Amino acid sequence: MKTILDFIEAKKNKKKITMISTYDYWSAMLCEKAGIDCILVGDSLGMVIQGKETTLPVKLEEMIYHTKAVKKGAPNTFIIVDMPFMSYQVNKDEAVKNAGKILKETGANAVKLEGGEEIAEIVEKMVSVGIPVMGHLGLTPQSVHALGGYRVQGRTKEQQKKIIKDSKILEQAGVFSIVLEAVPSYLAEEITEFLEIPTIGIGAGNKTDGQVLVLHDLIGIFETTPKFVKKYMEAGKLIVESLEKFKQEVQEGIFPDKEHTYE
Ligand code: KIV
């Protein structure tokens, strides 16, 4: 199993880090089989699994439920869990208690929090009690309403300055890595160069220290995906074709045949 030290070492050795966001037993098992460096149990499960419009309604108990399944499927992979909206923003004590609950009940290794300066004290407290924290800057989906939608961040000088400042503050606060989401490539490159901790990009170009994608995007479950998603297969299409074939064969009495029948 990798540790936070391995991720920092990977950056030093210029070895790219791979992270996949996924939420259940079978997919975690496949990620481990493929040698993916770490799994994020993302609160994107609110949209991908629950079909919601945003990640905001996701509950702490739901994150714990999904992480337990992921841990079963990938017992030897470093697992990071998104702390859901309002499970860490209210106060430090509640944040630490919730992060501790996640790690105790699931066997996960770290938590991820969205935000910069405004959560620095919370990060410091978590790190001081032994909870590894990953940061998340740029497009932070829990702030979708404040950002005015899912849009690229860091296009203006002012936004760039804030993201750069936040990344330094988070590093200082003790995060072991930072996700940079939907920011221009040159900005992600600049941040990656001055930080000692690794950056993991999503929609941030190829100069970050690692990359993360949501599994369901990568395998092509959904027809429409953001520009930054590369579909490595068309699983959605293949699944529909298989279901259509199943329906047809059942209706025509072709399935089950002798091979799939007990005598
Ligand atoms: O929730 C999630 O899956 C994420 C990744 C896309 C970085 O935060």
Image: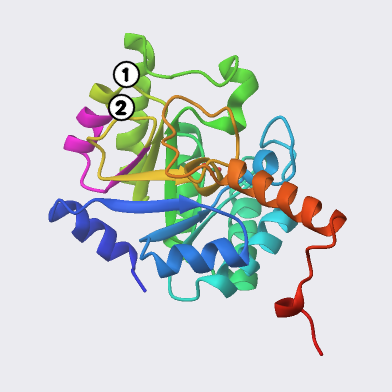
The image position of residue 195, as x and y in percent, is: 22, 40
Residue 78 visible, this orientation: no
Using the image as rendered, state which of residue 74 and residue 67 is in the foreground.
74
The image position of residue 237, as x and y in percent, is: 60, 41
On the rendered image, what quadrant is the C terminus found in? bottom right
Disc 1 to disc 2, C-alpha distance: 5 Å
User: Is 5 colored magenta in this rendering?
Assistant: no
Q: Mark 1: which amino acid? A: Lys
Q: Which residue is drawn at 56% across and 48% down?
A: 42
Using the image as rendered, state which of residue 74 and residue 176 is in the foreground.
74
Using the image as rendered, state which of residue 196 and residue 180 is in the foreground.
180
Q: Residue at x 53, y 29 (%)?
A: 225
User: Is 191 colored magenta in this rendering?
Assistant: yes
> Do residues under tags 1 and 2 come within 8 Å of each other at their CB atoms?
yes
User: Dot 1: what SS?
Assistant: helix
**In-image side of 224 versus 13 (left or right):** right
Q: Name the residue under label 2.
A: 164
Q: Mark 1 points at which residue?
A: 161
